[in-house]
Amino acid sequence: MKYSQLVVLLILGALWGASFLFMRVAAPEIGAVWLIEFRALIAGLVLLPWLLNKSEITILWLKAKDLLIVGALNSALPFVLIAYITTSIAAGVASILNAIVPIVGVVFSYFFVKEKLTLLQLLGIAFGFVGVVLLMTWQQANINSPSLLMVCAALVASISYVAGAHYTKKHLVEITSIAYVGGTQLAAACLLLPLLPFFIPDHMPSMNAVISTVGLAILSTSLAFMLYFKLIQQVGPTKTLSVTYLIPIFGLLWGALFLGETVTINQVVSAGLILFGVALSMGVLRVDRSRVKS
């Protein structure tokens, strides 16, 4: 993997880590379904001026079914589940639950796509998994009684993300990033529309919740998904999904800086394990076989 792609990976991790900050502020006031409706709708409308280009409209028309499927798998379903998680627990802890995506991705790739993985990649996933487990163990005092339900929600969201990534690689990799992001987000907004009457918020949201919703849509969705789509095109879904290992680190960082959530030495140790796992799984750290033989 090129270093320019690693920089994009870090930026993507920072943007998606910030999404947990935004959701933690907005979801308790707006609710998961309405928040994600606004997230997807605003993200799609931001790109609308470019989508009205004749060539983009043609792509949207020809790929409407595929965009609808990916909109459901990569946005509507997982976004709502993750937003639900953030209604009750800290942004940093919620981002940790999201870190199981690469584990699910490897299992999915092995059993359903027959994608070969190297020993170092598997070792990297193992290090990342250990880091996540340790962080979850040290954070268990912050996870309240619905934690099992939240873990199940995170697992379903992870499966949905992985399926969406592989479907994208198979059916949408040749379209433009504008058509992909705008089309999938508008599709997600349409899919969630019928659910809105059943989840009406109790009161008007605060200005902080409104600002967080806009930031979630523009920064953590429009911009982030364009970077995500580019990485899938360049390095494939399995390596791209390894960005999820970076999200807990940024989730903890943003939570500490802006919400006053505590970062402990235990969290730092776990973050180090996770980063080491990312380096192995992304091919940044390699074993020099010639030196091993000598």
Image: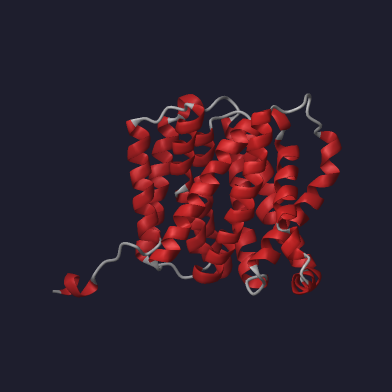
| Residue at 45%, 54% in the rendered image | 10
Does residue 151 appear to the left or right of 8 in the view shown? right
Does residue 221 appear to the left or right of 62 in the view shown? left
Quadrant of the image occupied by residue 153: top right
Q: From the viewer's perspective, is residue 253 above or below residue 191?
A: above
| Residue at 47%, 59% in the rendered image | 8
Q: Position of residue 30 (x, y in %)?
A: 72, 32
Quadrant of the image occupied by residue 206: top right
Q: Residue furthest left?
A: 294
| Quarter placement of the C terminus | bottom left
Q: Position of residue 268 (x, y in %)?
A: 35, 37
For the residue pair 242 and 54, the one nearer the viewer reads as 54
For the residue pair 135 and 176, the one nearer the viewer reads as 176
Q: Position of residue 252 (x, y in %)?
A: 45, 37
| Residue at 47%, 26% in the rendered image | 260
Q: From the viewer's perspective, is residue 240 above or below residue 212?
A: below
| Quarter placement of the N terminus | bottom left
Quadrant of the image occupied by residue 267: top left
| Residue at 36%, 57% in the rendered image | 279
Q: Position of residue 289 (x, y in %)?
A: 23, 72
The answer to whether one can see residue 131 in this image is: yes
For the residue pair 171 and 223, the one nearer the viewer reads as 223
